[in-house]
Image (spheres, coloured by chain):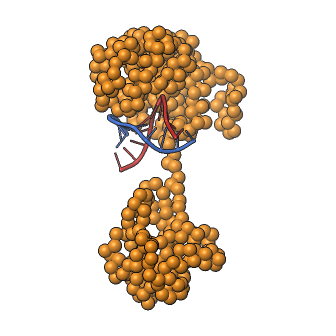
Chain colours: A orange, B red, C blue
DNA sequence: TTCCGGACGC
DNA sequence: GCGTCCGGAA
């Protein structure tokens, strides 16, 4: 079950079940919530599970201020779960229009229909049962259950992750599986035995107001005295950002095949990179390892060049790279001279292009640059 | 312009 | 596990 994390002991009682339990943590959150938290939001001060559910769905990825007018309009038109379940989808979507993430609205509608059909129109109180309904995940299920029924269930949304990452000095990207598992573990262990509603609301309010991403108000925070990030001056770097995924690297060889003043160009497929442009013929066999063995070279030339003429000479040119938004392309260019070229027959995508007209050709910038370098160097022409 | 995010689909 | 949705904030 529990996995020891080498070199990162959380506490003296690392291997004891429930070792994160800390009533002083929840006490601080609950006390702060009662004194300074939000108490007058339209979905507060009710135990109507329908209203609480609706607010929680609307609040996914959406801030309080944006939700309020939608929430109120929605309730006027759909005052209860049965009305919502019976309404046309079109009508539901119309009342969601502008809130974004429209799959939430579709799930909302389906969820209402399931609550009516399978639960007699009453939202279940068990978070695991709630989380089975469309649009309700683990955290949303816990929030609904806690607010509507006082259930002792842990939430873990983006705001709470930020609070926990800072207070407990949790390194690593909170979206990753191992870090998220640790955060859930904390969230469950820290739950108070009473006042779950105030505690849950307090965590949300802390994350949404004081413990914001940009300029957290640590001076007013009830957890400042126990905040690991504050103590180590790492508030700005926790929680860690999503690591940029390494840009994939791709390799190709480009063949500068010439016959006198002509160079062989090839039309790119319409879709994909450089779609529809002219470019150079490529040979994937000619990339690694370096140096390319002679037999690979012969093979590639036979395959890629033989249909166009008889090879007189072949020499590697200076490799270069080109960075796209989503990958980095490493190009190994080769200069190939033909003894004479053959007529193009059936090779509709190929063309013998006049080297002195290359400036006019619809070529990708790095290819044009390569060709101009080749043809601007008189010793490379013949 | 870049970053961020619950739930869900792949 | 990773991309998508979509709008707001940094």
Q: Does A277 sit left or right of A231 as displayed?
A: left
For the image, the number of numbered tags is 0
For image coordinates 46% across by 18% down, the residue present is A114
In the rendered image, residue A262, in percent from the top left (x then y), is placed at: 40, 83
Q: Residue furthest front?
A: A346
Vertical relation: A183 (above or below) A244: above
In the rendered image, residue A96, in percent from the top left (x then y), is placed at: 32, 26
- The quadrant holding residue A86 is top left
Regarding residue A32, the answer to whether it shows in the image is: no
State the residue in front, A69 or A112: A112
- The quadrant holding residue A9 is top right
For image coordinates 46% across by 26% down, the residue present is A135
In the rendered image, residue A311, in percent from the top left (x then y), is placed at: 53, 84
Regarding residue A326, the answer to whether it shows in the image is: yes
State the residue in front, A292 or A156: A292
Q: Does A279 sit left or right of A91 as displayed?
A: right
Q: Does A290 sit left or right of A30 as displayed?
A: right
State the residue in front, A1 or A282: A282
Q: Does A363 sit left or right of A318 as displayed?
A: left
Vertical relation: A59 (above or below) A342: above
In the rendered image, residue A113, in percent from the top left (x then y), is placed at: 43, 18
For image coordinates 57% across by 30% down, the residue present is A183
For image coordinates 42% across by 35% down, the residue present is A213
Q: Quadrant of the C terminus of chain A?
A: bottom left
């Amino acid at each position: 079950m529990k996995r020891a994390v080498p070199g990162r002991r959380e506490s003296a009682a690392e291997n004891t079940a429930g070792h994160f339990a800390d009533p002083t943590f929840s006490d601080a959150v609950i006390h702060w919530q009662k004194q300074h938290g939000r108490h007058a939001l339209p979905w507060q001060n009710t135990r109507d599970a329908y209203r609480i559910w609706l607010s929680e769905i609307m609040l996914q990825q959406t801030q309080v201020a944006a939700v309020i007018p939608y929430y109120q309009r929605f309730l006027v038109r759909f005052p209860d779960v049965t009305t919502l379940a019976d309404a046309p989808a079109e009508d539901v979507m119309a009342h969601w229009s502008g809130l974004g993430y429209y799959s939430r609205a579709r799930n909302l509608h389906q969820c209402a229909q399931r609550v009516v059909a399978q639960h007699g129109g009453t939202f279940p109180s068990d978070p695991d049962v709630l989380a089975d309904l469309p649009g309700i995940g683990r955290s949303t299920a816990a929030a609904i259950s806690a607010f509507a029924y006082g259930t002792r269930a842990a939430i873990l949304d983006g705001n709470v992750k930020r609070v926990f990452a800072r207070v407990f000095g949790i390194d690593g990207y909170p979206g990753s599986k191992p870090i998220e598992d640790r955060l859930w573990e904390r969230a469950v262990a820290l739950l108070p035995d009473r006042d779950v509603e105030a505690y849950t609301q307090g965590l949300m309010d802390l994350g949404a107001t004081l413990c914001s991403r940009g300029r957290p108000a640590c001076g007013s925070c009830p957890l400042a005295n126990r905040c690991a990030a504050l103590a180590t001056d790492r508030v700005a770097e926790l929680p860690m950002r999503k690591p940029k995924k390494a840009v994939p690297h791709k390799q190709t060889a480009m063949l500068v095949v010439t016959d006198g003043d002509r160079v062989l160009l090839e039309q790119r497929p319409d879709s994909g990179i450089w779609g529809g442009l002219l470019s150079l013929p490529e040979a994937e066999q000619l990339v690694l390892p370096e140096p390319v063995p002679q037999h690979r070279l012969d093979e590639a030339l036979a395959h890629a060049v033989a249909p166009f003429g008889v090879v007189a000479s072949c020499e590697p040119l200076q490799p270069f790279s080109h960075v796209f938004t989503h990958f980095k392309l490493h190009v190994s260019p080769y200069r190939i001279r033909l003894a004479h070229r053959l007529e193009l027959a059936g090779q509709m995508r190929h063309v013998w292009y006049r080297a002195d007209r290359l400036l006019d050709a619809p070529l990708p910038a790095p290819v044009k640059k390569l060709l101009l370098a080749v043809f601007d160097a008189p010793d490379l022409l013949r």
